[in-house]
Image: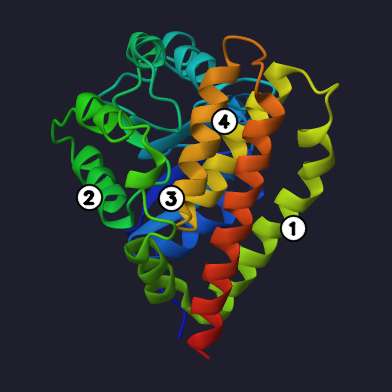
Amino acid sequence: MQTDTSNASRILYVEDLETDQALLPTVLPESQYRISIASNGQEAVERLKDEKFDLVLMDIEMPVMDGIEATRYIRNELKHSNDDLPILALTVHNTNEKRAAALEAGIDDFIPKPFDHDELQQKIEYWIQHDQTDSFIEAAQMFENTDLSSYPILDGKQIESFLQFIGIERTRELIEDSMSEYDKKTDMIFDTNTTADDLAKEMHAIASMSGNLGLSRFSMSCRTLMNDLKNGDIEDRMTRLMDVQALYDESVQKLKKIIDAMG
């Protein structure tokens, strides 16, 4: 039976990572939301010139045009007000500078990656209904603790949510796709000629991808390294990368065992 989407809210999801693009439509009910994808801020701007959406989920760091620049253009040039079009930022960044820039550009709320599926849906409902909520401070506090040992190797709640929404086979596919993406990046990541800025961008993408899969400690290790590299190269860069790799191997091994045990 075909799902009736005639009354569904239209959401523009602006995200450059294909693995994250594939994730969102699987966790939001098709009967309630129609998801359209834009791969960068420029694509989002072009879509919004001709199409009407009820809400935008905007990644912050993207190629071509980032989320803050795109939001500023949407507010100032396309004249979409906050009441007319809520824009929620999805990001792994947690600096005061980024949050201030997001607010100044016209972003309404902040959702950290990896996002909690229930929280994401609740916030979407709040903003589409034009309820007022401000969770910038609350979301920022989620990543203040950089002690890796305090984060689980695997986030059981995140994995259970995946299995509930998309089932074992699709979960396996997402895991395999994510591991394949990481494997493709390893030569560049461990290349000493890779600039600190380029490496930070890769850590940003990997932190988002792995966090969504429930690899919490690995995701935080990538996030921490990313933040340190933002200020330039670091002396213990290769040692840190080896630690990240070891944590990745441990996390994926445990994740595979869990999925395989489920049949």
Counting other residues with Cα less than 10 Å from the Cα at mark 4, is it few (<14), some (14-19), or many (20 or more)? Answer: many
Tell whether label 2 touches label 1 (CB within 8 Å). no
Counting other residues with Cα less than 10 Å from the Cα at mark 3, is it few (<14), some (14-19), or many (20 or more)? Answer: many
The relative height of residue 239 versus residue 215 in the rendered view (above or below) is above
Mark 1–mark 4 distance (CA, rounded to whole Å)? 27 Å
Element on which disc 2 rests? helix
Instruction: Please give the residue where the numbered disc 4 appears in the rendered image.
Output: 44
Colouring convention used in this rendered image of the protein: rainbow
Closer mark to the observer between disc 4 and disc 3: 3
Amino acid type at mark 1: Ser
Residue closest to the eye, 165 or 113: 113
Element on which disc 3 rests? helix
Closer mark to the observer between disc 1 and disc 2: 1
Instruction: Please give the residue where the numbered disc 3 appears in the rendered image.
Output: 216
Q: Quadrant of residue 160?
A: bottom left
Element on which disc 1 rests? helix
Amino acid type at mark 3: Ser
In the rendered image, is residue 4 in sight?
no
Residue depicted at 63% across the width and 50% down the height: 246
- Horizontal arrangement in the rendering, residue 130 relative to residue 41 (left or right): left
Q: Quadrant of residue 27?
A: bottom left
Instruction: Please give the residue where the numbered disc 2 appears in the rendered image.
Output: 122
Instruction: Please give the residue where the numbered disc 1 appears in the rendered image.
Output: 180
